[in-house]
Image (cartoon, helix red, strand yellow):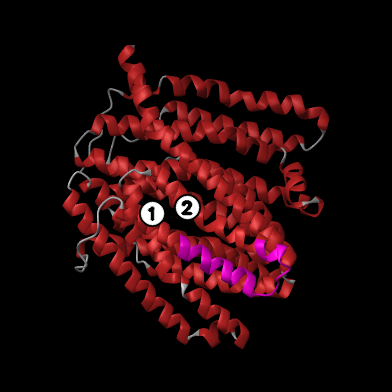
Amino acid sequence: MKSMQADRMSLARELIRPAAVLALSSGLMMAATFVGKAVLARVISVEEYGGYVLLLTVVASAGALCTLGLPEAVARAIAVARTDRIKVRTIMGQSLAWASFCALACAAALALLGNVLVGRQTKVFFFALMLASLPMSALIDISSGVLRGLEQFFRKALLDLAKPLIFLAGIILASTWHQSGLSVPVFSYVAGAGITAVVGLGFVFANGSPISVAFPTELFRYGLPLTAGALAGVVMGSFDTLFLGVTFGTLPVASYAAAMSLASLVGIVAGSFDNVFLPRCAYLLGHKRFDELSRTYRFAINASVLLNYPLVFVLIAWAGEVLQLTFGAQYRSAALLLQILALSNYLNSLLGPNHAGVKALGRSDISLRASLLIIGLKVVLGVLLIPYYGAAGAAAAYFVSQLGFNVYLRLSLKKLCGSLTMSGQNVLVSVLVIVSVAFSSVLGSTTSFTLIKIAAFALPFLPFLRGFRDVPAALAHKPVTAE
């Protein structure tokens, strides 16, 4: 009994604390971004805001792709080699130099296409300014990967927060000084990227000065297939919105964006555990500590599901009220969209940190195939469903493609590590969750049903607490077998 208690305390220290720091920073980052956009909409005109969104979409998409998977490769490589300080410094030097070079090349290529991408001359000038942020963003991403690999999660949280907070400060200052125009968000964005890049380099250099700029063959061999994952993220984040706007106009896009903003809150906790699990998994695999890896994996699933359940229940059971409270009465009609998207994100967290596990195993080829799967599913389903069902079709396409992506990763990880399976408790709770949220959703928004909804909420929550308490004892006999 004492041994099991010690296991739980150890897992709490190694997973929950850093994951809580990252979840808090992600929440603050989303809040800063949301407030910045709200203030910006009051400072500049609708046309200028649309122009900024266009510039940001192009630059952000390029920034996600131009580092060629190096941030993820760096996180894994440093997690494996972090006891070898010379090798760690070599990895840092290689990744910083080559990520910056790739970003500069991407910025130059996009600058040549400026007139094609943004058209009007005034926008081309601001587009060129925002392209200057690409090398800075590359340095930020690499610095974040280094800190993640070293498990310096508090510094990573500070780095993640810096850019949106500086952007928000710039917008507020412009509003105070009665400034307006497209220059307000552009200069705020570039300033945020530049200052954050300096902070990130300071954190990296605190771990030793990089000493090598040799071509990082191993990093690129692992990282290049992960570029498809970044492309999948770009497709997931922009295709449905753009196609919906082209097909139906701006009104359904606004409703879909509002629902997606709230549903993305469900992914904060799961994403935080993914960030913590990747270096921890790589380290345990490298040292062949398979029993501890099994307990850590199952603990991450249970903690993520437990912490996410109250939020997803509120978003699904009171979807209309939440939308009205946060975005206004005109968005209440997007309740169904919020229910679909929130349930999708929750089911994906229930499947576990599988993408992090696959990357920790060094199988970027599996990540590549999964990314191609999600891109194909999203595009095909979007083209088939959106013209007939509008925003609901976009939400359904997101649900199916995201679930297909995670199921494929789950099956692949199970094949690689046979003992990393969901417990019977997880399966039972997932069924009860779906039943409870579906029942609460059918009840509608009538106040008289509030107590019934609360009772439905307790249905899967209480047995899950018992299963969560007994996780280490239940899993101690199931060692992981890795190929």
The circle on residue 92 is none
User: Residue 144: which numbered mark, if any?
Assistant: 1
Residue at screen point 31% across, 32% down: 294
Residue visible at 51% across and 45% down in the picture = 25
Q: Which stretch is magenta?
A: 173-195
Q: Which residue is at the far front?
A: 177
Residue 400 place in picture, x, y as percent: 53, 52
Could you say which is closer to the camera, residue 224 or residue 178? Answer: 178
Q: CA distance from mark 2 to mark 1?
A: 8 Å
The amino acid pointed to by label 1 is Ser
Q: Are marks 2 and 1 in contact (CB under 8 Å)?
A: yes
Q: Is residue 364 visible?
A: yes
The quarter in which the N terminus is drawn is: top left
Q: Residue at x 36, y 44 (%)?
A: 152
Query: In the displayed structure, does residue 437 sit left or right of residue 227?
Result: right
Q: Is residue 422 in sight in this rendering?
A: no
Q: Nearer the viewer, residue 408 or 6?
A: 6
Note whether 116 is above or below 177 in the view shown: below
Magenta-span inclusion, residue 295: no
Are there few (<14), some (14-19), or many (20+) residues within 10 Å of tag 2?
many
Quadrant of the rendered structure where residue 312 is?
A: top right
Q: Is residue 280 above or below residue 130?
A: above
Give residue 309's quadrant in the image.
top right
Q: Residue 191 in magenta? A: yes
Residue holding disc 2? 160
Residue 402 as seen in the image, left or right of residue 84? right
Q: Is residue 435 left or right of residue 142?
A: right
Query: Dot 1: within a 10 Å radius of its alpha carbon, few (fewer than 14), some, or many (20 or more) residues?
Result: many
Q: Percent from the top left, x then y, of residue 343? A: 59, 43
